[in-house]
Image (cartoon, helix red, strand yellow):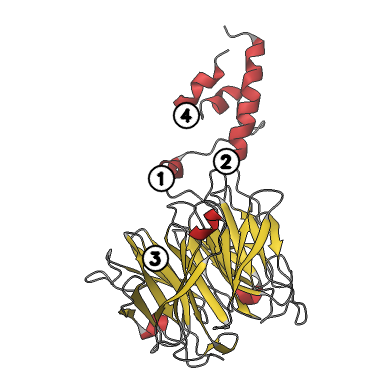
Amino acid sequence: MRPAGSWLHVVPLLSAITTISQAVELPLPVKLVHQFPAPAYLNSIYVRPNGDIYVTTVWPDASIYSVSGANTDTPKASLVHTFDEINVATSITETEPGVLAFLGGNQSSIGVGIFGTFGVWEIDLRPQAKGGKPTIRYAVPIPDGGLMTGIQALPESPSTVLVSDSLLGLVYKVDTLTGKYEVAIRDEDSMGHPSWTVTPFGINNLRIHNGYLYWTNSYLASVYRVAITKDGYAAPGAKIELVKRLQTIYLDSICLGPGDGDTIWGATNADNRLVAITADGNATFVAGSPTEMTIAGSVAPGFGTLPGDTETLYVATGGSLLFPVNGTITEGGKIVAVNTTGFGVDESKPQEKTQPSITFSPQTTSWMEYLFQFPLKHLSLFRS
């Protein structure tokens, strides 16, 4: 017979497991990482493998900033470069270690690009390792393009990127080494701009995830996807799918995760919220509010990359510059950290989906019935 004192080892374990089985409380916790002076309008975010965060601005100028130590109590923001040649930098990614590709051009007002001024630029960070300054080059001008808003490197050949053109409603394939580009995917229904929009703005951000290209159509507040080949074209016979149409005014940029998980996280910009769309199609607003400044003008999310930080979702904002909170309130754009731990199910670990919940009610459950709910793999933890 087990000594009575042995049950003391059970209590902390029971508490921990029942806590895990509870639904996560909403809204998710949000922490400010860094705020830029007004009227900075951040437009995109990229988290490098070393944890450094890079953001671009589309107002009042075209700039690139970095933030190091985002997961510490003392993050540090630095200006990488402000451009004279262009006045908007829309989206950024990494094409090889230390080389970032971004989209830049000119606009007449926020969200209204000047035709023929956009292309792919590169900023090489590697000279910084020896105390030098980053080098910048205009890698691929696209003179027949419109407003370019999203960029993603192909996983198997990252020097080639897919680029969304919001004005023309299509996706280019761009080789940053040769300078060649071509239309890879075009679809008016999912990528074109609706006739009733204030500005000619269709496809916005795009992401490549588990063999699919995902993109947003902002004014339709919708996410679409299509299976693609490793070369960036729509797979033979693949059809474009509507993943989700949201009950919201606008949908800006998305990301998927954490890790290989299929949950889509979207920034709604106009109503200052973060939405999570799980693999079963359910959409939940998990942070922010139309009447709060928590993530005012949320524009772009991206997950942390360092160990222990991969469930932190970093969100860049535009400071509600286009859609003032309560009609009057704006602020400088900022980066916030959203703790997504415990939300939904980690699709990269399917075995967790069928794990039964463990419950105890003093009125209906005996201690012995309670213990029998534990998986056998936990029985060793009860040994004295």
The mark tally for this picture is 4
**Would you call the spot at circle 1 few (<14 residues within 10 Å), some (14-19), or many (20 or more)?**
few
Whichever of labels 2 and 3 marks the residue nearer the N terminus, that label is: 2
Is residue 181 toward the left or the right of residue 193 in the image?
left
Whether residue 243 is visible: no
Q: Nearer the viewer, mark 2 or mark 3?
A: 3
* Label 3, label 4: how far apart the Cα atoms are: 43 Å
Determine whether label 4 and label 2 are within 8 Å by CB.
Answer: no
Determine whether label 3 and label 1 are within 8 Å by CB.
Answer: no
The quadrant holding residue 279 is: bottom left
Q: Nearer the viewer, mark 3 or mark 4?
A: 3
Judging by the rendered image, the residue that carries numbered circle 2 is 21
Q: Position of residue 93 (x, y in %)?
A: 47, 65
* Label 2, label 3: how far apart the Cα atoms are: 38 Å
140 up-or-down from 36: above or below: below
* Label 4, label 2: how far apart the Cα atoms are: 14 Å
Question: In this view of the protein, which residue sits in the foreground, 221 or 302?
Answer: 302
Residue at coordinates 70% horizontally, 56% vertically from top-left? 31
Q: Nearer the viewer, mark 1 or mark 4?
A: 1
* Label 1, label 2: how far apart the Cα atoms are: 16 Å
The quadrant holding residue 29 is: bottom right
* Label 3, label 1: how far apart the Cα atoms are: 28 Å
User: Amino acid type of disc 2?
Assistant: Ser
Question: In this view of the protein, which residue sits in the foreground, 159 or 270?
Answer: 159
Judging by the rendered image, the residue that carries numbered circle 1 is 350
| Image mark for residue 6 | none
Judging by the rendered image, the residue that carries numbered circle 4 is 375
**Would you call the spot at circle 2 few (<14 residues within 10 Å), some (14-19), or many (20 or more)?**
some
**Would you call the spot at circle 3 few (<14 residues within 10 Å), some (14-19), or many (20 or more)?**
many
Residue at coordinates 54% horizontally, 86% vertically from top-left? 106
